[in-house]
Image: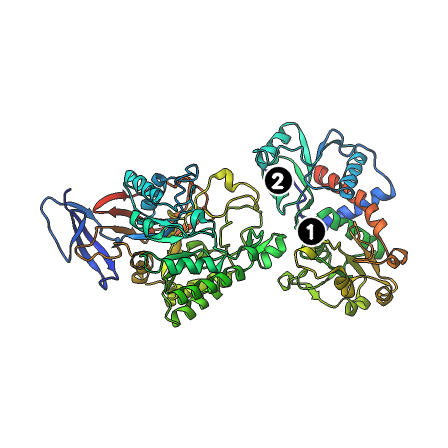
Amino acid sequence: MKPLLIRGGRVVDPSQGIDAVRDLLVRDGIIAALDEHQAVDGADVFDATGTIVTPGFIDMHVHLREPGQTHKESIASGSAAAVAGGFTAVACMPNTEPALDSPALIAEVLRLAHEAGLARIYPVGAITRGRQGKELAPYWRLRDAGAVAFSDDGATIASARVLRQAALYARDVPGVFISHCEDDDLKALGVMNEGVHSMQLGLAGSPGLAEDIVVARDLLIAGETGKPFHIAHLSTAMSIELMKFARAQGFAVTCEVTPHHLLLGDDRFERFRADAKVNPPLRAELDAAALRAAVRDGAIDAFATDHAPHTREEKAQLLSEAPAGFSGLEVALGAYARALPDLPLARFVELLSCNPARILGVPGGSLRAGSPADITIFADREWTCDPSRFRSLGKNTPFAGVTFPRKALATIVGGRIVMQGVG
Amino acid sequence: MPERSLLDLDDLSSDDIIYILDRATRFHVAPPERNLLRDICVVNLFFEASTRTFTSFAIAEQRVGADIVALPPGSSSLGKGETIADTAITLAAMGVRVIVTRHPESGFPYRLAESFDGHVINAGDGRHAHPTQALLDLLTLATEFGRVAGLKVALVGDILHSRVARSNVIGLRRLGAEVILVGPQTLLPDAMARAGVRIERDLDAILPEVDALMLLRIQRERIASAVLPSLDDYARNYRLDAPRLAKLQPHAIVMHPGPYNRGIELTEEVFASSGWRYVQQVSHGVYVRMAVLDFLVNGRSA
């Protein structure tokens, strides 16, 4: 492979405290040098003038639906969506069919990811067998096969005893526990947030308490067992306060927030369509505002999309029947910027790259010489979301027609340009 | 461009509501020729058991001369892979112009209307809306008092699960009535408060000030789902009985959308009281539904 010289971009790399115009040299898939002006004979030159060059974005929470639900998404289509959105790596959740609870399934995901050859794919193994919340998954063997973290995402483990045992057994296994926090009993048949809007529409609501109570429990289990926990897709103001409490106790806990919980409220169901149905549900505007403030003040560790593609037919069903979730990879960068226009770029890159790499314990998050050449190049450029152009098979998003202020221009994985100038 | 539908009362301006009530009153006084909906095919698509509303619509449709097809619950291919849009397109292609629908899920008529080239009338969707019930309640009030504006109307009981209550709140406010919602927290959460709607927990305290009471049906499942401790406990605070009847103003009326539970939300004394208007409500239902069909299909005639 010829060397690649990324010339003249504004390099933002919080891992080295750099925010300056630099030339970035990539050789053999590795960052070779980051200097003011470089000239390298025989190198391919990427003119990055006027753009922002950062360590590759890592989305630590996506659903790639393979094996078992390739009508919704495949590892190939999901990888294409990832790199189109500027992501060099994604961690895929184990709620596939069957669930990723055996080494053979982890190996199969990695084989398919290699075949797709675009983004790096980090499989997340299940915490319990079949994600049934009862028996423990084989953490050491899942880890050996390549699982980077563990989660029953989409299903909250109802038994505190089972989760505590799991955390104790897995304490010394590298790989954080990722918690999806919703108390199924409190949530009941809720299709949206419980609040003034659900009351007016006569729709069954799931209260914020359904999340808070499980966040509190899981943070306490993290503290008691010593197993690092990462709380997925926080959606309430109280969850943030609980995170702050747990951190103050010195617990090894981190958390993420999605673009939709930052930007959207629970006022989107007037026509009873399921486009905005998601778990946990979109909350009140006060919660969204609290999440944005928490990103600014450092209480949130990572941005993650919870990319959850479904078919048009599935999402066209009645609210009670339609599955929760929507595609997120190809809108994320724009949506984060829209939600937090004043967020310093260095913090933006920490949330999208450095912190996810650190939490998952995977390479990336830095442009330091010797690091893998996973690079995202983007610009503050307006564009309008048109889901029909998604690479993802899931064309559903509550952001259709929304204008975003930031756009991915190129994605480089291991020194190879895997996406450039997508429309 | 989809045709005009009646999905909830916020689809109607206060002028429209007054027009419909006025037409219904005229139909009551002098039945129209059975030709207002001549050659118009109406399908009654009910996914939930209903005697009162189903029969009331069927009679109203006959009296305006529509061609009627009733699809009994379970006969629709919905749920067998056909989407809501497929059903709407299929019925429209057969020449159906009006669908009257009842469904256990809030919002179903909205989803049907977005694909149906014709008029949809919501005959009750989940806990959400029941606009023709609210119209017949408004007609009952208007007939009784000669106006709705300025009346003080209390809705009592299971507001949270009541589509009748939701539509009535919209209609009553639109016509200028003062609305009081009364019930325990689990049946009437604080989050139901909105501009122009008072929430009260103490029925006895408000009885002397209201012009009309609308009682709502209490369902026994609320005990199994831990929403109510017992019917007795509910009755202690909210059942309309003789002592509570005595606290009402002499001119006050008592309404109920039916079916009512004797001994639960009301006692036998209510039926014998001078203010009980259930029979008038049911009777008004037919005329209001005739007026709605005429209004949607033919628009406002002079």
Query: From the image, which quarter does the N terminus of chain B lie in?
Result: top right
Evaluate if marks 2 and 1 touch, with contact meaning CB atoms under 8 Å apart.
no
Query: From the image, which quarter does the C terminus of chain B lie in?
Result: top right
Which chain is disc 1 placed on? B
Specify whether disc 2 shares its chain with disc 1.
yes
Q: Which residue is mark 2?
A: B113
Q: Determine which of the numbered discs, if any, sits on residue A211 in the image.
A: none
Q: Nearer the viewer, residue A412 or A301?
A: A301
What is the x, y in percent for residue A214? Answer: 49, 61
- Quarter of the figure with residue A232: bottom left
Q: Nearer the viewer, residue A330 or A109?
A: A109
Q: Which residue is mark 1?
A: B163
| Side of A24 relative to A162 (left or right) | left
Q: Secondary structure at mark 1?
A: helix
Mark sitting earlier along the chain (2/1): 2
Q: Residue at x 68, y 55 (%)?
A: B224
| Side of A212 relative to B256 (left or right) | left
- Residue B76 lies, with reference to residue B7, above or below; the image says above
What is the x, y in percent for residue B114? Answer: 59, 40
Q: Secondary structure at mark 2?
A: helix
